[in-house]
């Protein structure tokens, strides 16, 4: 029941993000819309840079998304400090999914209402696109489109 509400929360913002990975290219695109007319639209973003080789887009509840991005930044920085090299694209997704999984099991916590897509380049120049959804699962993909128009895209 709570997961259904979390997926509805992703669509509350009225945004759709698209991520596509091809041979030698990968791209993420999202809409840029200020939630209130009084906000300067140049300050609103859903795209974030994690490391030199990893970027992400968050669709859904802005506060939940920023919380996940902050956690992913912490994981990437901690990895670089401990091991001396940049984290791969899959590791922040796994760690964020593990953290999000706690929210799905405890009754006093609500699941995060955001869908996070990470895109990056690996050491062997291979491109990776992975996603973390409110069910606390992570998977790689070639194309995905979370948001309001998710079912309308080909």
Image: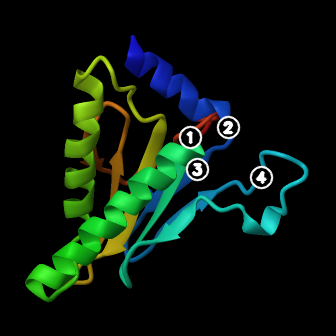
Q: Image point 42% across, 35% down: which residue?
A: 112
Tell me the CA gap for discs 2 and 4: 9 Å
In this picture, is 37 found above or below 56?
above
Q: Residues within 10 Å of mark 3 (few under 14, many from 20)?
A: many
Do callouts 1 and 2 mark residues in contact (Cβ within 8 Å)?
A: yes
Q: Image point 47% across, 58% down: which residue?
A: 20
Residue where numbered disc 3 is placed: 17
| Rendered location of residue 153, percent (x, y) | 60, 39
Tell me the CA gap for discs 1 and 2: 6 Å
Tell me the CA gap for discs 1 and 4: 13 Å
Q: Earlier in the sequence, mark 3 or mark 4?
A: 3
Tell me the CA gap for discs 1 and 3: 10 Å
- In the displayed structure, does residue 74 sit left or right of residue 29? left
The N terminus sits in image quarter? top left
| Rendered location of residue 81, percent (x, y) | 17, 83
Residue where numbered disc 2 is placed: 13
| Rendered location of residue 116, percent (x, y) | 43, 50
Query: For the residue labelled by badge 2, is the local secondary structure a helix, a strand or a loop?
Result: loop
Tell me the CA gap for discs 3 and 4: 12 Å
Residue where numbered disc 4 is placed: 33
Tell me the CA gap for discs 2 and 3: 11 Å
Q: Image point 45% across, 43% down: which residue?
A: 115
Q: Image point 84% across, 63% down: which residue?
A: 40
Do callouts 1 and 4 mark residues in contact (Cβ within 8 Å)?
A: no
Q: Residues within 10 Å of mark 1 (few under 14, many from 20)?
A: many
As drawn, the label of residue 60 is 1
Q: Residues within 10 Å of mark 4 (few under 14, many from 20)?
A: some
């Amino acid at each position: 029941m709570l997961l259904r509400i979390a997926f509805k929360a992703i669509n509350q913002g009225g945004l759709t993000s698209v991520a596509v990975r091809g041979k030698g290219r990968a791209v993420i695109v999202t809409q840029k819309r200020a939630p209130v007319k009084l906000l300067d639209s140049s300050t609103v973003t859903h795209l974030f840079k994690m490391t030199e080789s990893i970027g992400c887009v968050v669709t859904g509840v802005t506060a939940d998304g920023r919380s996940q991005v902050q956690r992913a930044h912490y994981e990437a920085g901690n990895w670089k400090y401990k091991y001396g090299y940049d984290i791969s694209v899959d590791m922040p997704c796994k760690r964020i999914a593990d953290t999000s999984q706690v929210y799905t099991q405890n009754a006093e916590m609500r699941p995060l209402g955001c869908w996070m897509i990470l895109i990056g380049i690996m050491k062997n120049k291979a491109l990776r696109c992975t996603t973390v959804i409110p069910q606390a699962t992570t998977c790689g993909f070639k194309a995905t489109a979370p948001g309001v128009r998710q079912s309308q895209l080909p």
